[in-house]
Every structure is written in structure tokens, then in C-alpha cells.
Image (cartoon, rainbow, N blue to C red):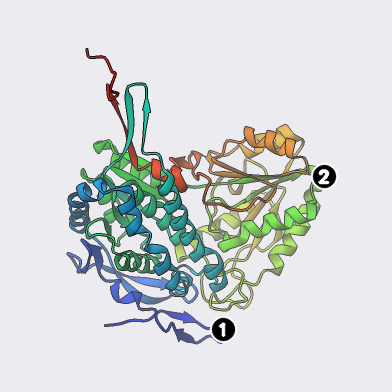
Amino acid sequence: MSYYLEIPNVSGGYWEGDNVNCLENSERFFINGQWVSPSAQDQQDIINPATEEPCGRLALAHAQDVNRAVEVAHAAFEAWSTITRAERLEVLGRIPSIYQRRAEEMSQAISLEMGAPITLARESQTPAGLAHIEETLDALRHYQFEECEDDILITHEPIGVAGLITPWNWPMNQIACKVMPALAAGCTVVLKPSEIAPLSAIIFTEILHEAGVPAGVYNMVQGDGPVAGEALACHPLVNVVSFTGSTQAGIAVAQAAAPTVKRVLQELGGKSANIIFPDTDFADVVERGAQECFGNSGQSCDAPTRMLVPHELMEKAMDIAAKVANGLRVGNPADSMTELGPVVSASQFNRIQALIEKGTAQGAILAAGGAGRPDGLAQGYYVRPTVFGHVTSDMVIAQEEIFGPVLSIMGYADEDDAIRLANSTPYGLAAYVQSGSMERARRVARKLRAGTVTLNGAAWTVKAPFGGYGLSGNGRECSRFGIAEFLETKAIVGYGANSKKH
């Protein structure tokens, strides 16, 4: 039976995408080049966060489904890992054009499954996946897999079967930046996408199948973390696990993987500081910082959720950020004018509401937003864009990742104090510095404990390595850095023609 994505239209009814039919595969898994039935009939509803209503059904994998996919990937590894770079590029190089052809369908799926405004899905969510695909192909063309030092050959070889567990908030960004480097490195793959946002992963799988990725090289099972995710992480034939999600879930994945001593890559939570110095165009950088915090309904692990400003400019920053929050158009994701959609689920909505209330209870000054839904939105997981001022580092909202459209503005005394505050959480995924002095911006960036530091609004790029310090995880994604994480290093001593025998 064929299904079609149903997305709310601007008048409150529904419309059907003309060529969107990925729901027909939502009750099946992709294993060994085929869509196959699950071993059991466990299913869950796929919830549209804009309506709180089901829009489809999703099959949930059991351990035997994961085992089947892993064994197939293990069997396919020898052939895929030993083909030439040119042969691998020929296969993977067919992916971008197919992805571009299905871009609108992908955008509609992302909007439906996780509530991204359709404009955001078209302009950011879907293109992010393509950017990673193209950058990985470029990195593969130039990657140095072998080098000689004296009589030693240093060779970098694919590690084996890669188990990839991806989140719902930037589904194509995270799927592409894991799957493509793993395949480029010569690994075979078992992907378990988020069960909350599974539709885009189905389309991505269909794209790889159409591109002719050999049977068994790429496999995909749907399911939840405690069952399917754990089965993948602990499987003895999986050689590396790459996980993106919450720090708590990342710890669980690492614990499941530990008995088999496999490599574990983790991109986890964040509580990123945005240090704004007074020698900037203050109003402009505060406005941009607030917009970036609220983007994707605050559901970005590297969002600049802590804005650090001089004490004497606190009230001015609160006023500017409040105007941004109050001016955002929150509502129907299918409306091209919508700037903020709902958050992804009831559990996320309830957690965000509790943290907003905690911020008020602990003495933070509410400048905009607050608890509850925005006016006129009685249904859907919509959160009021919220700004807190006079936040101190001992408050929960300054330490915990909220993952919603909530900005905390903190005051600092001087440069050293700003650096201290920026480094005062256990997270270290990203940080931001705004200064009219590039010398100062560079100096401060070197002192921040974060995997990525962005200076003065520099553009996002897939060429930079992405990953964090501390509770934000380990390992790096993107470009050649992502490929490197799926390789083992071997030294062949005595490889040179003039080596001595012992």
C-alpha cells in the first residue's frame, strides 16, 4: 500500500506531496540491498509535532533484526574495503544528483517528522546533507591513505563495520556526516536513525539504493535506543559506533560498547557561550545571537544559548533579544512565512516548560516569552521564544542543555571573567566570540574549552572538524576528519627496499 506525507497547510487542512511516498517503507528495514519485513510486529506511531497526531506507523527492530543487518555488513566488508578509491568514488559520486532530485521530498519529510518550518527545511536542513555528501567526496579524492617514513609504511585502513546512531534535530546533517565518511573510508554501515524522525532516513536509504551502493554495504534498521541502539552498540561484529544525541544516552552507548572494546565516537550535548565584547556593533551582534539561539526552535546542539555581555549592557541586551523573540513568527511548519515550528515531541515540550519555570524560580529575569504555548496555538508542541536576563552560572538554565528556544543572558566583569563563565559548564561543543579586535577574538578563542569556536559571525562550513570537549563527547566529524575516525593505522616496518633485517 502506498502512503503520502500529510503536512498541515496554511488554512489548517492537509495537502499531499505529489511524489512523496516514503511511508510505504516505514514498516520495513533495508538489509542486504532489499526492503525486508521485521522479525516481529512491534510498531509505534510517527507523530506530527505540529498536530500531535499520528501520520504513519514505524516498525521497531529487535536484536535479531540488528544482528541480521550487522552480519550482512560484516560479510560485505571484505569486498567494499578492498576496492580502489576510484571505484568507491564512482559509486558514491552518483549520490548527489539523486539527492538533489529528491530534495523537495526530503524537505517535506523533515518538516513533517520534526516540525521544521518548510523554508528552514528547504534552505538549511536538506542542503546540509548535500553539503556533507559533496565535501566527503572531495575529501576522499585527496585523502592520503598511505605515507612512507624511512623504511616504515604508514597505512590507514577501514576499521570494519560501522554502527551509526543518529538524532532527530538535524536528521540529514547527521546521517550524511556519518554515513558518507564511513563509506568513503571503506567501512560497511548499519544505520539506526532516530525513531522520532524516521522518514528522511527512508528517503536517504532509497537514494543510496538508487545510486547502486552494493548490497550489504549500507543497511538501515529503525528502532529505539534501549533495544535497537543497544543491540548495535554491543554487537561483537561492529567495530566502531558513532552516536549523536544526549550526553546521558551517549554514556549508555559507551557502556554497551565497552565489553567489546570497540571505538566509540560521540557528539553529545552543548551549552555554548556567545561572548559579546562592547567594541562590536552591539545591537547587531545581540540580535544575530538571539536569532541563532532560536533557530530550529532551539534544537541545535551547538546553539549559542548562553549570551555573555558586560554587566553594564545587560538591560540593553535583554531589550534587543526580547524584540527578536517577540517578533518571531511561530506556527504552522507548512507556511513558508513561519520562522519557528514546534519542538519535536511531548517529552521535549514538557522538559522545556519545566526548565523555563525553574529559571523563573531561581531568580532569572524574564524579558520575553515564558511558560506555556504562544497565543493562538492550542495544539502542537509549540514553545514561546524565551529570553532570561541576569542569569548566573549556578542556575540550572545556565548549566543544563534546554534544547528549546530559550536564551540565557549572563553578565561579565572583564575579559578574564567572560572566559571563566564561558568555560563554567561541563560541556564544550561550541563557542562564539564577537569583538571589533581580531587580536582579542583570536586570543579569547584559544582559551575556550570548545571543539569549535566561531569568530564574528563566520559562516558555517562542513570543512571544519566538528566535535566537543568534556561531556560534549569525543571524536570529530566532517570532511577528512570524519573519514579519519573510521580508519585504523597500521605500520609496516621494513617496507623500504633498503631496510635492514634483524
Of 116 and 172, the residue lying toward us: 172
Q: Determine the residue located farthest toward the front in the rendered image.
A: 497
| Quarter of the image with the N terminus in it | bottom left
Of 97 and 476, the residue lying toward us: 97
- Regarding residue 267, the answer to whether it shows in the image is no
Tell me residue 250's x, y (percent): 39, 45
Q: Which residue is drawn at 26% across and 46% down?
A: 81
Q: Is mark 1 on a helix, strand or loop?
A: loop
Note whether 26 is above or below 287 in the view shown.
below
Tell me residue 208's x, y (percent): 33, 64
Q: Determine the residue located farthest toward the top in the rendered image.
A: 502
Report the residue marked by disc 2: 312
Q: Which residue is drawn at 43% across and 73% down?
A: 101
- Relative placement, left or right, of 6 versus 253 is right
User: Which badge, 2 or 1, comes first in the chain's sequence?
Assistant: 1
Report the residue marked by disc 1: 10
Tell me residue 297's x, y (percent): 57, 63
Note whether 393 is above or below 403 in the view shown.
above
Note whether 215 is above or below 308 in the view shown.
below
| Quarter of the image with the C terminus in it | top left
Q: What element carries label 2?
A: helix
